[in-house]
Image: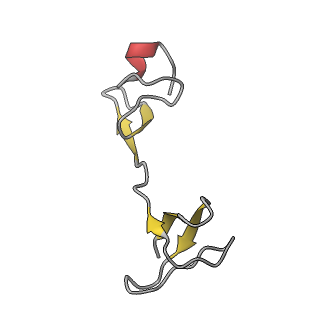
């Protein structure tokens, strides 16, 4: 069951909601507004190196400590 992120333009609140059907109407838990917009969530992937080590990266970014495309670019350790 997918959990989506939403934004309410009426009160400015961002929230997560379990969505059982694509036709389900989502209301803001803060103000009850029904004009909520689904947000694009950042995805994460796990890479396995040749030595068997793993690293996690957010899509479009590095290890989270900087905006480099890889940990080699910032010297961070994932």
Residue 62, position as x, y percentages in the image: 42, 28
Q: Residue at x 42, y 36 (%)?
A: 57
Q: Residue furthest front?
A: 10
| Rendered image coloring scheme | secondary structure
Residue 9, above or below 27:
above
Residue 67, above or below 30:
above
Looking at the image, residue 26 sits to the left or right of residue 31; the answer is left
Residue 29, position as x, y percentages in the image: 66, 74
Q: Nearer the viewer, residue 23 or 1?
A: 23
| Number of numbered labels in the structure image | 0
Q: Residue furthest left?
A: 50
Looking at the image, residue 59 sits to the left or right of residue 28; the answer is left
Residue 69, position as x, y percentages in the image: 35, 25
Residue 3, above or below 62:
below
Q: Residue at x 57, y 67 (%)?
A: 10
Q: Residue at x 40, y 42 (%)?
A: 46
Residue 61, position as x, y percentages in the image: 40, 32
Q: Residue at x 43, y 59 (%)?
A: 39
Q: Quadrant of residue 60?
A: top left
Q: Nearer the viewer, residue 49 or 69?
A: 69
């Amino acid at each position: 069951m997918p959990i989506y992120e939403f934004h309410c333009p009426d009160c400015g609140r961002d929230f997560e909601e379990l969505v059982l059907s694509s036709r389900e109407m989502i209301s803001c838990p803060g103000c009850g507004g029904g004009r909520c917009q689904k947000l694009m969530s950042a995805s994460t992937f796990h890479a396995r190196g040749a030595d068997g080590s793993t690293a996690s990266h957010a899509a479009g970014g590095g290890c989270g400590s900087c905006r480099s495309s890889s940990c080699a670019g910032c010297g961070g350790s994932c």
